[in-house]
Image (cartoon, helix red, strand yellow):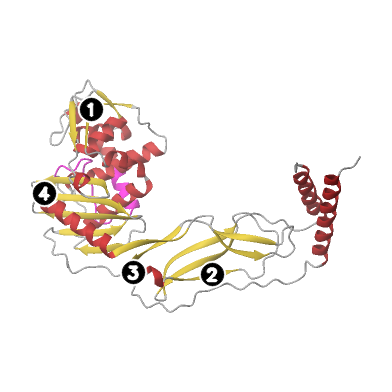
Amino acid sequence: MLNKKFFIKIFLIFSIIIFQSKIIFCFDATYIWSALVDDAIITSSSLSVETNNSLNLESASAVLIEQNSGTVLYNHNMHEKLRPASVTKIMTILLIMEALDSGKINYTDKVPCSENASNMGGSQIWLDVSEELTVDEMLKAICVVSANDCTVAMAEYLAGSEELFVNQMNEKAKELGMDDTTFKNCHGIDADGHLTSAYDIALMSRELMKNHPNITKYTTIWMDSLRNGESELVNTNKLIRNYDGATGLKTGSTSLALFNLSATATKNDLSLIAVVMKAPTSAIRFSEAKKLLDFGFNTYEFKELGKKDDIVQTLPVAKGIQTSVDLIYENDVGCLVKKGESKNISHNISFDENLCAPIFKGQKLGEVTFLLKGNEISKVDIVAKTEVLKISVWNMISHVINTWLSLCRIT
């Protein structure tokens, strides 16, 4: 005996076939879909860079940037070439993290100590040539106490010699656009010609924090130990203990360089990098980095405009098995604005008005442009969420079969 469910399924299948047949006879129809555009007049001002040392900094050079976009928010002699001291190690750490994230090395690898590394002097944990530490332990020592011996040991482990590693550092600096920089060593002890700028330090800090966020496992340590508790570590970056949202990054000082710092922090989805160079005292470098960060967090906010895969629009599709397709953001999209101005952001949506199958999943079908006072502040592609096959006898049959199988699973 045929039951009621069977007749329901038969009815649905015939309905689908009739519906698809209608599409076959009307696939030449033209579809026009207009974008909904917010044409509101924007009255807020665009971002401007503070360049007149309005914060009255005593440091010779400083810069504040937003980590996600790299936008410069405060500039005080940011391209002046100065001695970086141990802030140099940001580049060393960056190359270590690249090697880790690419699988070239592992956190558990044992790293030997050469005679050269053990004799470095300066900040160190007094490595012995008979000693081996893991990459994890080396990173902890470099990030927390700026250990020169561990820095050189890692350079030799990665490149075979410190000289070859320094070549890699300079190559990476060139790749990042660090035009003010020449590295002569991997640790930052004063050397003729070993120079960089606050801006370049911000560039390599951004590369490290944005693309290798696992480094904060080390840069946020305040106190720890090595060698089964025998070697105590206390972070040289005092902001880790006393600045809310601090995430790193690196201190540096010598008698010639004076006091340097790259300080990173995140609050309410806004991540900032403040760099000060040649501060007169250690206390001043921390207070001025804090002053820069406070200025940034008090003045700006990060506005999330859309998330990857959020549906932006649904458009009709001609000649397709499906009659419409969802358009989604290809990536997360957001922007940096002055506080209070996010309400004035408008957007334009542009896309193909006459979509015709086939359409492929992930195919770019348009873009959304976000505007502030008529100025573009962000743009993101919108893509097809799913594929839409061009209608044909075979595709229709396949579609009906798949629908039938789906209905057969109804209990």
Q: Main secondary structure of the magenta part?
A: loop
Q: Residue at x 28, y 59 (%)?
A: 65
- Residue 363: image tag: none
Q: Earlier in the sequence, mark 3 or mark 4?
A: 4
Q: Pointers 4 and 2 in contact (CB under 8 A)?
A: no
Disc 3: which residue? 340
SS assignment at label 2: strand
Q: Earlier in the sequence, mark 1 or mark 2?
A: 1
Disc 2: which residue? 349
Disc 1: which residue? 226
Q: Earlier in the sequence, mark 1 or mark 4?
A: 1
Disc 4: which residue? 282
Q: Residue at x 84, y 59 (%)?
A: 18
Q: Amino acid at mark 1?
A: Leu
What separation in Å lies between label 1 and label 2 (alpha carbons)? 56 Å
Q: Amino acid at mark 2?
A: Ile
Relative to 117, 70 lies left or right: right
Residue 385 location in percent, x, y? 60, 55
Q: Residue at x 72, y 56 (%)?
A: 389
**Image quadrant in which the N terminus is located:** top right
What range is drawn magenta here?
A: 167-190
The quadrant where residue 301 appears: bottom left
